[in-house]
Image (tube, helix red, strand yellow):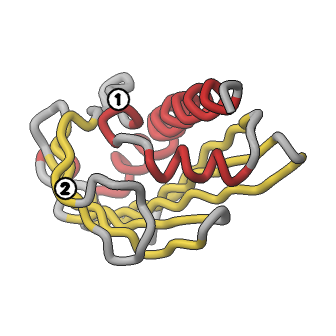
Amino acid sequence: MPIQTSAAITINAPLAHVFQTAAAMDPCALIRDHGPLPGIVNCQGHTAPWSAIGQQRKHTLSDKSSVNEELTAFSQDEHYAYRVTKFTGPFAKLVDEASGEWRFTSVAPETTSVVWTYSFTPRRALAMPALWLIVKLLWPGYLGSALARVKQKAENENSHL
């Protein structure tokens, strides 16, 4: 049974701009170390903005582990989703695969809501308690700090449009 968590943020910029900012953000700038959770230090494969189902990339993390990521859904200015597989390092013992989904909603002409949901499938039942603690206690802050970087970038760029 998957373990899920979400983080949300409101960004003072139009939906199309926020979507493009998030889809195009450099993974190394987006996902940084947060507490004990590692950040992305290298990205191989698809490095352009997410735009088509099937695009793939491999991330090397600051703890020397790695994951593969594949875009599984894409609807311009609405949402995109991806699957994370081939975990190495400590997470490999806990996680079979994970999925992430970003949803974008215009709440006013210059205001966009972004909700980022992550769902983890444990490798085995014995991994559930440890994975639950990581996902429920640490992951929301990890996602929230990344969303704050999207907000900062989108709002700064929007002020120059």
* Quarter of the image where one finds residue 7: top right
Q: Residue at x 30, y 26 (%)?
A: 36
| Mark positioned earlier in the residue sequence (1 or 2) | 1
Disc 2 marks which residue?
A: 58
| In the displayed structure image, the side of residue 64 where residue 19 appears, left or right | right
Looking at the rendered image, the quarter that the C terminus falls into is top right
Q: CA distance from mark 1 to mark 2?
A: 16 Å
Going by the picture, which residue comes out furthest to the front?
A: 161
| In the displayed structure image, the side of residue 94 where residue 35 appears, left or right | right
* Quarter of the image where one finds residue 27: top left
Disc 1 marks which residue?
A: 32
Please state which amino acid type lies under the numbered disc 2. Lys
What kind of element bears circle 2?
Answer: strand
Residue 68 in the image: above or below residue 108: below
Give coordinates of residue 72: x percent, y percent.
42, 75
Give coordinates of residue 95: x percent, y percent.
27, 59
Q: Nearer the viewer, residue 143 or 89?
A: 143
